[in-house]
Every structure is written in structure tokens, then in C-alpha cells.
Image: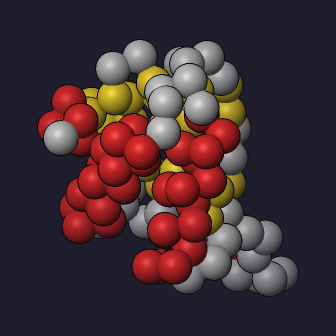
């Protein structure tokens, strides 16, 4: 039940998707050692790809910066203890279709 300890920093996701992200992060932390950030990220990414379609990216760690472009409604950044998790759906928009993408200010853990 580690997801109950999560603190959301930034998001534009629907509440149900946020809850899925927190639940999957908790499940990943139950299955993998907290120091295995690559496996945790891979698990969360694959589950979101399966549930919400391809194109999800996940970054997990204790110290990273980011500046990403993401689909509107598809971004969450949260912490569970000292571990930070950034999950977003990113893709290049077809020319003239940039209203679906949002640039997010840098997130520094």
C-alpha cells in the first residue's frame, strides 16, 4: 500500500488515471527493489501502454531533471518516499496539430 504515501507534484491527468499510476507504482515497488529504478519504470510504462495505448514514457529515480512535451491530460509527476516518478505520454504531433501537446516546465527532484 505504498501508493497511499504518494505525493503528487504536478499533473493534468484525470483522477482515475492518476489513481492507476499510483497503484501501479505501489505494485512495482512491491515487486522490485527501490534501487531498481529501470525495472520500476519499465513495469509502469508497459502497464500504461497496455491500458491506455502506446507512447507512454516513465522516468524513475531520486535525482533527475526533465523538460518534456506531452499529450494534454497525460502527465503526472509524483513522489513515493524519496523516489520520484514522472509518467507521460509523449509523441510528435502532426504538423498543425500542436494543440494536443503541452510543454511542461522543468521538473527537478
> How many numbered marks does the figure carry?
0
Q: Looking at this view, is 11 or 29 the one in front?
A: 29
Locate residue 67, reporting x and y percent.
Answer: 69, 38
Residue 49 shown left or right of residue 95 in the figure: left
Percent across and percent down for residue 70 are: 61, 59
> Does residue 16 appear left or right of residue 10 in this picture?
left
Specify how the rendered protein is coloured. Answer: secondary structure
Above or below: residue 93 compared with residue 69: below
Please report the residue visible at 23 percent of the width from the left and 67 percent of the height from the top: 16
Can residue 90 be seen by looking at this rendering?
Answer: yes
Residue 62 x/y as whole percent = 55, 19
Q: Quadrant of the N terminus?
A: top left
Q: In the rendered image, which quarter is residue 53 located in?
A: bottom right
Instruction: Identify the residue at horizontal 36%, vertical 55% (top origin).
Output: 24
Quick check: 66 left or right of 78?
A: right
Q: Considering only vertical position in the picture, is 13 above or below 66?
A: below
Residue 5 image position (x, y, % from top left): 20, 30
Q: Residue furthest right?
A: 95
Q: Classify residue 98 by image quadrant.
A: bottom right
Residue at 34% over, 50% down: 27
- Identity of the residue drawn at 61% across and 17% down: 63
Front one among 29 and 67: 29
In this rendering, does residue 10 appear at all? no
Amino acid at each position: 500500500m505504498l501508493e497511499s504515501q504518494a505525493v503528487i507534484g504536478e499533473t493534468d491527468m484525470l483522477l482515475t488515471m492518476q489513481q492507476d499510476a499510483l497503484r501501479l507504482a505501489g505494485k512495482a515497488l512491491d515487486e522490485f527493489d527501490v534501487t531498481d529504478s529501470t525495472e520500476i519504470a519499465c513495469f509502469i510504462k508497459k502497464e500504461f501502454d497496455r491500458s491506455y495505448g502506446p507512447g507512454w514514457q516513465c522516468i524513475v529515480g531520486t535525482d533527475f531533471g526533465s523538460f518534456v512535451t506531452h499529450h494534454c491530460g497525460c502527465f503526472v509527476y509524483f513522489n513515493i518516499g524519496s523516489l520520484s516518478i514522472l509518467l507521460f505520454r509523449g509523441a510528435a504531433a502532426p504538423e498543425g496539430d500542436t494543440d494536443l501537446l503541452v510543454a511542461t516546465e522543468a521538473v527537478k527532484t
